[in-house]
Image (cartoon, helix red, strand yellow):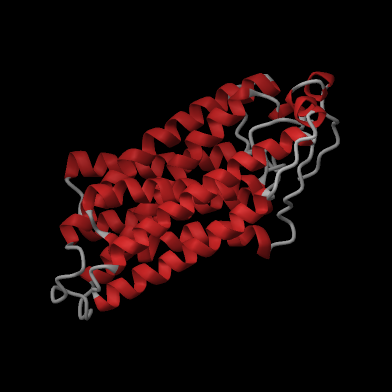
């Protein structure tokens, strides 16, 4: 992320100065919170994995309880990160760059997963979903290009539209990540000759997996739609045009069409099962390219992210 514009005078005199004038000292950095939550997510993955293999009735609920603890710590880290932006004098919601978006992406994945787990009581799907939450945080440490340093926002990011746009988009992305993980499990469960086919009662049935896949996309599609709409409003605020066919905008629209096709096929042609699972996987591939590919392969107005 290349930033050349210093924070505006209004930002220098805002909440950041208030925190600094009080000599507020945070006992732990946000990175500490994120590292702890990442470790917990990995332990939860192992817990769900062992639960799926041993069918230990106590291990599943324990893993879910541990996951909730990880989410609380993760949430605390987001709050601390926000306080840290105020300490530097910039004072913004931490959703402005690749580092912060990955941290938030991980958080939204856990939130969506827990909602669906509480609804369907299928803890085994955590084996295929929680790794995404772990990897999203892990990527911030693996790749040197992902910088955790707090820096001033460029003018285009100094808008409340940023918070609304990014929040809605990532809740959509998280829902699609869940549908992807469930679709992979569906294909394994339904595969011809698979040892999981039909014989293992502890695995979710294919109709349940298909239902979770569908409901995940039902959650994610309106979120993505709202994200695109608020993104257009933000673009008009920042650049004077609602739509400019920037690569990020174009690929967001492609992703939207993939999931729109999924819902259309489901509602009009009753697409279920393997076809729905495959289309869900294709859709998440579009999500990943929209998120990572556009930022690192194709230059555009969103290259700062």
Q: Residue 62: tell me if it is visible.
A: yes
- Residue in the image at 54% along x and 28% along y: 164
- Residue in the image at 49% along x and 62% along y: 40
Residue 43 lies, in percent from the top left, at 46, 68
- Residue in the image at 22% along x and 44% along y: 266
Q: Residue 297: tell me if it is visible.
A: no
Residue 252 lies, in percent from the top left, at 51, 40
Residue 81 lies, in percent from the top left, at 66, 42
Residue 264 lies in quadrant:
top left
Q: Quadrant of the C terminus?
A: top right
Horizontal arrangement in the rendering, residue 259 relative to residue 264 (left or right): right
Count of marks overlaid on the render: 0
Q: Quadrant of the N terminus?
A: top right
Above or below, comparing residue 199 to residue 187 in the picture = below
Residue 34 lies in quadrant:
bottom right
- Residue in the image at 29% along x and 52% along y: 117
Horizontal arrangement in the rendering, residue 301 relative to residue 268 (left or right): right
Above or below, comparing residue 254 to residue 288 in the picture = above
Horizontal arrangement in the rendering, residue 118 relative to residue 304 (left or right): left
């Amino acid at each position: 992320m290349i930033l050349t514009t210093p924070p505006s005078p209004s930002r220098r005199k805002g909440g950041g100065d208030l925190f600094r004038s009080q000599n507020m000292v945070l006992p732990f950095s946000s990175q500490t919170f994120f590292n702890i939550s990442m470790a917990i997510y990995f332990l939860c993955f192992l817990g769900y994995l062992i639960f799926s293999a041993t069918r230990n009735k106590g291990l599943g609920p324990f893993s879910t309880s541990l996951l909730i603890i990880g989410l609380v710590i993760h949430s605390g880290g987001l709050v601390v990160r926000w306080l840290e932006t105020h300490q530097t004098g910039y004072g913004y919601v931490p959703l402005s760059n690749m580092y912060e978006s990955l941290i938030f992406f991980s958080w939204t994945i856990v939130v969506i997963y827990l909602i669906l787990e509480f609804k369907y009581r299928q803890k085994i799907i955590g084996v295929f979903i929680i790794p995404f939450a772990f990897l999203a945080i892990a990527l911030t440490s693996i790749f040197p290009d992902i910088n955790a340093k707090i820096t001033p926002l460029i003018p285009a990011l100094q808008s409340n539209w940023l918070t609304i746009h990014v929040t809605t988009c990532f809740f959509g992305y998280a829902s699609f990540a869940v549908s992807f993980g469930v679709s992979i499990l569906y294909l394994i469960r339904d595969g011809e000759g698979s040892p999981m086919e039909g014989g293992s009662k502890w695995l979710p049935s294919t109709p349940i997996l298909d239902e979770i896949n569908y409901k995940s996309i039902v959650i994610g599609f309106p979120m993505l739609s709202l994200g695109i709409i608020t993104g257009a409003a933000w673009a008009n605020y920042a650049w004077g045009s609602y739509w400019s066919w920037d690569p990020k905008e174009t690929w967001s629209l492609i992703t939207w069409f993939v999931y729109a096709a999924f819902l259309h096929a489901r509602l009009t042609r009753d697409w279920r099962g393997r076809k729905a699972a495959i289309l869900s996987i294709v859709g998440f591939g579009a999500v990943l390219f929209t998120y990572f590919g556009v930022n690192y392969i194709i230059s555009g107005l969103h290259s700062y992210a």
